[in-house]
Image (cartoon, helix red, strand yellow):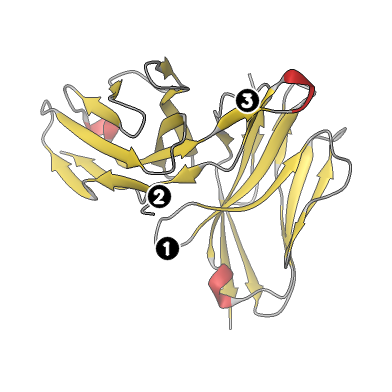
Amino acid sequence: NAGVTQTPKFQVLKTGQSMTLQCAQDMNHNSMYWYRQDPGMGLRLIYYSASEGTTDKGEVPNGYNVSRLNKREFSLRLESAAPSQTSVYFCASSEIYAGLWGMTANNEQFFGPGTRLTVL
Amino acid sequence: AQTVTQSQPEMSVQEAETVTLSCTYDTSESNYYLFWYKQPPSRQMILVIRQEAYKQQNATENRFSVNFQKAAKSFSLKISDSQLGDTAMYFCAFMKLPATGKLIFGQGTELSVKP
């Protein structure tokens, strides 16, 4: 079990270039997430996919697009990179299931190793 | 909207001593989860402990325990018998229920354990 894998681990882009960050999980989880981590700000949710075929915006979606390719894979695309997108990007996955009192509940969220992206 | 605040950017503790990391949150929800995540220098995010808001009993995991004060919206993490391997960034996080899996993180506290 590899858990959550991300490629690449490091990337340097010039302003205006595009790239796609890849994420895959082998735990058969239904939900996947993209976060960015900036100093002094913790992690912030960019986009998430509650289940295969669905995606939704998180806290900071501007400048990004996502694709839930299948149950295993969730990619994040920067169409025209900007210096403000310099950050560490984390992909995560988890299982949403029926919990107490008819509400959905959530098990542990597993994170990938992160991608350090620098935009010059 | 929910917010999570960690007011201690940095802390240090001597090996084998006890340290408490603070976290406060703001929400109008009555059902939610709270988490503490650890991020060592390797950058990997690791779940340390989790608390369901409907449970009055504070969660414990070996040397890690929480003090959950729902009325005060406070969720502190106590690390007992600190070890060098506890050196890391610690993040407090909130998830409302019904769960969508979306986590809201605090700013983090960098903990250094000194020999």
The residue at the point 54 percent across, 28 percent down is: B102
- In the displayed structure image, the side of residue B82 where residue A81 appears, left or right: left
Q: Position of residue B70 (x, y in %)?
A: 84, 35
- In the displayed structure image, the side of residue A36 where residue B69 appears, left or right: right
Q: Mark 1 and mark 3 in contact (Cβ < 8 Å)?
A: no
The residue at the point 83 percent across, 49 percent down is: B58
Callout 1 amino acid: Pro
Q: Where is residue B25 in the image (x, y as percent from the top left)?
A: 71, 33
User: Which quadrant of the view contains residue B103?
Assistant: top right
Q: Mark 2 and mark 3 in contact (Cβ < 8 Å)?
A: no
Which residue is denoted by mark 3 in the rendering? Answer: B99
Q: Mark 2 lies on which chain?
A: A
Which residue is denoted by mark 2 in the rendering? Answer: A3
Label 1's element? Answer: loop
Q: Which chain carries label 1?
A: B
**On residue B101, which mark appears?**
none
Q: How crowded is mark 3: few (under 14 residues within 10 Å), some or many (20 or more)?
A: many
Q: Quadrant of the C terminus of chain B?
A: bottom right
- As measured in the structure, the alpha-carbon distance from the residue carrying label 3 to the one carrying label 1 is 30 Å
Q: Front-most of A86 and A22?
A: A22
Callout 3 amino acid: Ala
Which residue is denoted by mark 1 in the rendering? Answer: B41
- In the displayed structure image, the side of residue B24 where residue B101 appears, left or right: left
- As measured in the structure, the alpha-carbon distance from the residue carrying label 3 to the one carrying label 2 is 21 Å
Same-subunit check for callouts 2 and 1: no
Is residue B29 visible from the viewing direction of this image?
A: yes
Q: Quadrant of the N terminus of chain B?
A: top right
Label 3's element? Answer: loop
- As measured in the structure, the alpha-carbon distance from the residue carrying label 2 to the one carrying label 1 is 19 Å
